Structure formats: C-alpha cells, structure tokens
Amino acid sequence: MKKIFQTLILAAFVVLATASFGYAEYIAAATDNFPYFHLGCLIVGGLIITSLKHKYSRIYLSEAIGSFALYAVLVALFTVPVVDALKAFVS
C-alpha cells in the first residue's frame, strides 16, 4: 500500500511540474514557437522515473522527486525563451 501511495504522489508531482512547464512556456513563447519536443521529453522522463519508482521500492520518494525536478530544470534551460534571455543578459 505504501509503495502505491508513494507512486501516486510522484505521479501527481510529475503531472503538476509538467503542467506548470507547459503553462510557463505557453506564456513566455509565441504560439508558433511552443517547444513540443521539450514537453514530450519531459513527459517521457516523468514516465520513466515513475515506472522506476514503482518497480524498485528502495528508491526513496524524495530522490525520485528531486531527480525529476532537476531533469525539468535541465529541459527548461534549453528552450528558446531561456536561451534568448541568457543572450540578452550576456550582451
């Protein structure tokens, strides 16, 4: 029961983080520049981390959430609005 409950918590976090990424990119980017590939990578990564958490019970919930959060930040760093902001900051 504890394993299923922790997997559900992780799945809820993945869905909320992915939805917030999608909303932030929708607001920051134009409608023709929406990063569908990045969103797909984020969804697939969330599915993989969730399935690993469900399969291996020795993975702590905080480790799985932390690894997905870091993965979401890494994916967000390579989107067009963030790259444009970094270009403007440097120059």
Image: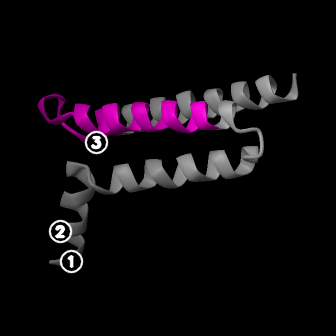
Residue hosting label 3:
28
In the image, taking residue 59 as reference, residue 71 lies left or right, namely left
- Vertical order, 15 against 59 (above or below): above
Q: Position of residue 49 (x, y in %)?
A: 55, 39
> What span is colored magenta in the figure?
25-52
Residue in the picture at 25% in, 49% down? 79
Are circles 2 and 1 on residues that touch, CB within 8 Å? yes
Residue type, numbered disc 2: Lys
Q: Position of residue 58 (x, y in %)?
A: 77, 46
| Label 1 element class | helix
Label 3 or label 2, whichever comes before in sequence order: 3
In the foreground, 80 or 28: 80
Report the Cα–Cα distance between label 2 and label 1.
5 Å
Residue in the picture at 24% in, 61% down? 85
In the foreground, 29 or 1: 1
Pick out the residue farthest to the bottom. 91
Residue in the picture at 15% in, 36% down? 33
Task: Tell me if mark 1 has few (under 14), some (14-19) or many (20+) residues whose alpha carbon lies within 10 angstroms of its own.
Answer: few
In the image, taking residue 4 as reference, residue 71 lies left or right, namely left
Residue hosting label 2:
87
